Amino acid sequence: MNIQQNLTSDTTRQREVVDALNAVLPKGAVLFNEEDTRPYECDGLSAYRQLPMVVALPENEEQVVGVLKACHRLKVPIVPRGAGTGLSGGALPIAEGVVLSTARLNRILKMDSYARTAVVQPGVRNISISEAAAPHGLYYAPDPSSQIACTIGGNVAENSGGVHCLKYGLTVHNVMRIRMVTISGEVVELGNEALDAAGFDLLAVFIGSEGMLGIVTEVTVRLIPKPQQARVIMASFNDVVTGGNAVADIIAAGIIPAGLEMMDRTSSRMVEPFVHAGYDIDAAALLLCESDGNIEEVEDEILRMEAVLQHSGATAITVSQNEAERLKFWSGRKNAFPAAGRISPDYYCMDGTIPRKELGRVLLGIEEMEKKYGLRCANVFHAGDGNLHPLILFDANNADEFHRAELFGEEILELCVEVGGTITGEHGVGLEKINSMCVQFSREELDAFFAVKRAFDPPQLLNPTKAIPTLHRCAEHGKMHVRKGELKFSDLPRF
């Protein structure tokens, strides 16, 4: 069920904003008619939609500065947007606000093969960086499943990872410097191209801030050498608990694979007819374990992982014999989300992170929730670092199913917190998980988050109502969700 918010806006106010933006942007870069703004009504979380009052399409940093100064002067909220592939509603527009799209800031400004860095604008697609670096034998490591479409600016906003983040880290580990514009129009640089920067690590604060602190105009990323060889092991297991324990066993053996992913039977059966990856669709769980490096290093690590997997109860083990087969194994994992459309009208993708040792417990918990809510769930996730991506399958045309899917997702996130994890790994909080923030964080912690927000954005105009819940919201959420006999924020009035 699509939740369409109020579409009306004050036309006088809209005209005032349009005139102000037309003064700083070129012709055709300010959209305000419904037929032009409709494509911006949601991000990848399409269950929630809202037409923006205006869409701004700056083409360079100077124009970004102009947009921010105009909106600051007029006190108009701004929602930054990259490619719109986010899955948490972080780019959902505000009815009386401006969507600032960075899609036209899409140039690779510098490729330095000696320093192994690239300087890019925020609208550059993730995979384009690796394509440009390939002639130098280099690539950009973070590889979200949406890497052919998602942009580096969006990756910075959400601190995106990908299937190789276990060994090579998230966006925060691969970005060296950011140039950004504050709400007042001031251009600020965070980090630098050296090993460290003086003062507080504001670069790490900014990465993952979901567009709430400033607008990115330039990013310097770290490039790494392309490995001589990469091979993947595909291991089958008779139950998800055994498969989950095998993940912990590999790490405990001192092995850090380039990728360590897990899929349950529902997801492998969903994907196999779509990509023909050669998956064992009878297995309760599949593990994909990749090793990369020089030839001798890979051969040794593959043998060591095979031994661990056999000892951990794998019922079948297949090792890729060439690059084509390796890519085929990964194609299923990377196409899990679109493949969901083969078996369900809609899916709700969650994004919680847990300690690796709790994988089995959480997967069994999700199985029980399937029975409780009467909905199927396909589990695909970055098993190596405990980042879960349960796909709750439902029909959005059925209001009751949509409601049950939301409750199902909330309970998964609560279980993640209960076992010592967190409510997000790489998709961000946005609008989707804002109530779950009340489950994980105390009043004092939320106050600290708001203090950081105010330091960067005193008028609270950048992506307001996202990521950090107000105390009133938490009070209301606490009224509806009693845990261990106590209410969160019991000192606040209930509504």
Image (spheres, helix red, strand yellow):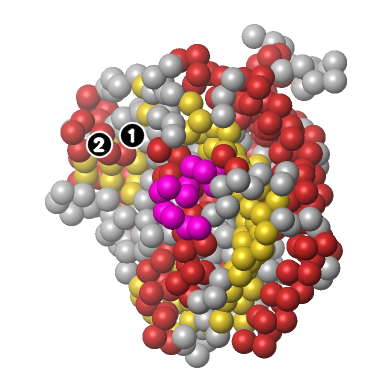
Q: Residue at x 56, y 24 (%)?
A: 375
Furthest residue in direction left, as rendered: 27
> Which residue corresponds to the image point at 56% horizontal and 47% vertical from the top-left?
281
Q: Which mark is residue 37?
A: 2
Residue designated by label 1? 41
Residue 194 % position (x, y): 61, 80
Question: Few, some or many C-alpha atoms within 10 Å of disc 2 (few <14, some 14-19, many ≥20)?
Answer: some
Looking at the image, residue 484 lies above or below residue 219: above
Question: Is 400 placed left or right of 303 in the picture?
Answer: left
**Horizontal side, residue 125 vs residue 141: left or right:** left
Q: Which residues are magenta?
A: 267-278
Identify the element where label 1 is drawn: loop
Indicate the position of residue 133 as horizontal and vertical percent values: 42, 80
The overriding secondary structure of the stretch rendered in magenta is helix
**115 over 101 or under it: above or below:** below
Q: Secondary structure at mark 2?
A: helix
Q: Position of residue 263 (x, y in %)?
A: 61, 49
Residue 140 in the image, given as x and y percentages of width and height: 50, 72
Q: Amino acid at mark 2?
A: Thr
Look at the picture and state if 171 lies above or below 301. Answer: above
Residue type, mark 1 in image:
Glu
The 10 Å Cα crowd at callout 1, few under 14, some 14 to 19, many 20 or more, is many
Let me know if residue 171 appears in the view. no
Distance Cα–Cα, label 1 vs label 2: 7 Å
**Callouts 1 and 2 close, C-beta under 8 Å:** yes
